[in-house]
Image (cartoon, helix red, strand yellow):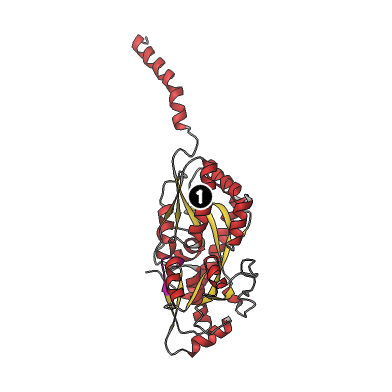
Amino acid sequence: MISRRTLLSAAGASALAPLALPARAQAWPQKPIRVVVTFAAGGSSDIVARLLQPGLQEKLGQPVIVDNKPGAGGTIGGADVAKAAADGYTLLLSNTAPISISPFMLAQPTYDPVKSFVHTAYIGAVPNVFVVHPAVPSKTVGELVAWIKAQTKPVNYGSGGVGSIGHIVGELFKKEYGLNMEHVPYRGSGPMHTDLLGGTLQFAIDTLTQNVPYIKDGKLRGLAVTSRARMALAPEIPTVAEAGYPKLLAENFLGISAPAGTPKDVVDKVHRATAEVLARPDIVKRLEDMGVALTKMSQPEFDGFVAKQVAEWAPAVKASGAKLN
């Protein structure tokens, strides 16, 4: 026989059950979302993240916090997100360095660029530019090669950091053409420009975006962009192929990635919110003005794009001989 106490307990549990359901089925997001940027403030990843931040906050209904975690070619930030809870509250402003390059420079990679993430929303790509201080007499890449070979000491070249595209392109440039060069890594483009504009550093391979104002003001000279076609942002600068150096073609992609295992409905919401922000004419103009070539991709297409990037860059990284200590 069932006692009166048992019946009351069962009735109480039944009455409370509906109240507990909403707590388990709360719609995402319910708290601030952190977007990790793998380079210091002032670089292209940081600029893009902060440009999208207000729109993502509006679409998702929660604060979006940009968290700069530079270092180790972007792998510090990449590992932070790869190891985070797969709940959508920690995202990565993914780019070529921590996804396609830096993991292959480590003796023991801290994450797998394909398996550790679900690549959620593609944004676009921006090329690098060979840029020199005006004191360097070179006006073309060919003249730069000749100038470097004429120097009695190694020529320092700067990049936004170890494992950046600028670093790898520089190492390929050095190896392919027998150049006496030494890499000077910075924690982002901002710190590098201090030395480059001051003449302490004479040559750099860096993202086009943040160099255009200096090139237009005559403070720096752009020799070639690493894209397939000339950029509307700086149409006077030839491509590396036009300059006679097609092997130096390299573009830095930008996107948003989440830890592997993030629920599909969360991934879909991030993808949709990003696409809606990227559809705004003012955002499109600002990104294009920065030299970002926008391309629409579905989430599965972005996953496939990353897998292809990794397959293409891994051999180039190994051929460059570049390492992360």
Q: Position of residue 103 (x, y in %)?
A: 45, 63
Residue 164 seen in the figure: yes
Residue 3 seen in the figure: no
Residue occupying image coordinates x 64% and y 73%: 236
Residue 237 in the magenta stretch? The answer is no
Judge by depth and name the residue closer to the eye, 166 or 66.
66
| Apparent side of residue 93 relative to residue 245 in the rendered image (left or right) | left
Residue occupying image coordinates x 65% and y 77%: 242
Q: Quadrant of residue 295?
A: bottom right
Q: Position of residue 254 (x, y in %)?
A: 54, 58
Q: Which residue is mark 1?
A: 53
Residue occupying image coordinates x 55% and y 61%: 253
Q: Quadrant of the N terminus?
A: top left
Q: Secondary structure at mark 1?
A: helix
Q: Quadrant of the C terminus?
A: bottom left
Check disc 1: other Cα within 10 Å, few if <14, some if 14-19, many if 20+.
Answer: some
Amino acid carrying label 1: it is Gln
Judge by depth and name the residue closer to the eye, 263 or 174.
174
Is 113 placed above or below 271 here?
A: below
Is 273 placed above or below 289 here?
A: above
| Apparent side of residue 83 relative to residue 256 in the rendered image (left or right) | left
| Apparent side of residue 50 relative to residue 80 in the rendered image (left or right) | right
Q: How many marks?
A: 1
The stretch in magenta equals 184-189
Q: Position of residue 277 (x, y in %)?
A: 58, 48
